[in-house]
Amino acid sequence: MKWSLVATGLLGLISCSRETEVRPNFVFILTDDHRWDAMGCAGNGIIQTPNLDRLAADGMRFRNGYVTTPICAASRASILTGMYERKHRYTFTKPPVKADLLRNTYPYQLRKSGYKTGFIGKLGVNLEKGWADSLFNYCHTDAYPYWKEVNGRRVHLTDLEGEYAMKFLDSCNQDQPFCLSLSFWAPHAVDESKEQYFWPEWCDTLYRDDVIPVPATATDEIFQRQPEFIRHSFSRTRWYWRFDDPVKYQEMVKGYYRMISSVDAVVGRIRNKLKERGLDENTVIIFMGDNGYFLGERGLADKWLMYEQSIRVPLIIYDPRLPAKASGRVTDDPGLNIDVGPTMMEMAGISIPAGVQGRSLGPVLEGKPITGREYLLFEHLWDFDSIPMSECIRSDSFKYIRYLKHPGFDELYNLKTDPDELQNLINEEGMREKAEELRRRLLDLSGF
């Protein structure tokens, strides 16, 4: 199967042989610690992301983009495999992802079917020995520091990752489809540094005169209402690193925004390169974050927990083969990190392996609603004392959270009336039936 535009200008699916099929190219761009609303197109009136805004205007933005586990290691393994953490079992301190799962990954399946595959940036996942060469024709991984010395030049890591992306795209042509996975470290903080955020020099003047509004939920009263195991978690430790006084708060959030703006600039260069190479009309671009990020809400920083700031991420899909009337749409249908691989595989005409749990988002691009996703499962299963293990089920209206090592601290929120998740209804007399229903559904989903 392939995607094509029929004469009427409507999207159609047609069958054709692999020999005559023109399959799309893919550029999958992943950012680190990028919360869903840190883009102009998502309603942020301060941050400057003109290229992401343009990508959303040309494609589709998912208002409800989510990661199934809000931590980079597990989330990136979920993106690769299309599986939940409890199935691929990879996170920090765990053994490498095994070959039987790696055969289900989107780069392996695409490469096996004739795609040229490339990876640049932060892989964030340990693979069974030798398997990086099986997934990618070209693989360049990197790490801190953000400032590098390259051939006598001082180059920021984000720009350097962009340069490697340009080289990969220069090696591509219309004779072989390709898939480039560009995985930025930005806007991840340097945890060991007092400064935390580092950006290219051209970003120095950005946001200099702006005043970043402090979230209404960033109060000590709200913080103190939380259980002790959250008040003493890593999310509070890192709050002290970044947000514990008003001046520091302004400096840190502006630094975070500058790093995102530097990524945005590289996105623009990639689109220009695709056009220069004559590849722009057949290259699907997917942009996503690997987990969300607290900016002081609830008196917290970073991610890991099951609240919206932690699990919700930007997700944009641009397919230039769609008719012009498909541009600029915003959907409420959920898009998950485990859906990225299945989406690319289906567009490439590849059967999605049986073990993959994500779903293709292609139907959403057609304007068709996703069925069978009334409830979404989230989890954080790393057994680490400073981060509570938790799992969660979310519907359009309600969210139920439980902490695996802290029974008795379950949470239930009505997302329609309490989008900030401040009024825990778990012990409300009239909500016991709803809590029990969601608890049963969580057990059903988590058992697959």
Image (tube, rainbow, N blue to C red):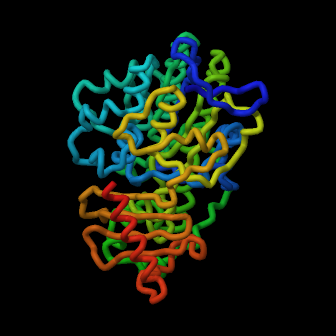
Question: Horizontal placement of 288 versus 355: left or right?
Answer: right
Identify the image quadrant of residue 385.
Answer: bottom left
Can the viewer see residue 373 in this picture?
A: yes
Please tell me which residue is depicted at 26% across the width and 33% down the height of the picture.
Answer: 100
Position of residue 69 measured from the top left corner of the image (x, y, whole percent):
39, 53
Question: Horizontal placement of 428 versus 403: left or right?
Answer: right
Q: Nearer the viewer, residue 55 or 61?
A: 61
Above-or-below relation of 320 to 218: above
Above-or-below relation of 339 to 103: below
Above-or-below relation of 277 to 332: above
Please tell me which residue is depicted at 43% across the width and 24% down the height of the picture.
Answer: 110
Position of residue 297 measured from the top left corner of the image (x, y, whole percent):
51, 67
Question: Horizontal placement of 68 versus 324: left or right?
Answer: left
Identify the image quadrant of residue 316.
Answer: top right
Question: Horizontal placement of 387 versus 273: left or right?
Answer: left
Number of numbered tags placed on the structure image? 0
User: What quarter of the picture does the N terminus occupy?
Assistant: top right
Q: Nearer the viewer, residue 309 or 433?
A: 433
Position of residue 354 measured from the top left corner of the image (x, y, whole percent):
36, 38
Position of residue 232 measured from the top left corner of the image (x, y, whole percent):
32, 71
Q: Residue furthest front?
A: 15
Please tell me which residue is depicted at 44% across the width and 62% down the height of the picture.
Answer: 301
User: What quarter of the picture does the C terminus occupy?
Assistant: bottom left
Above-or-below relation of 396 to 139: below
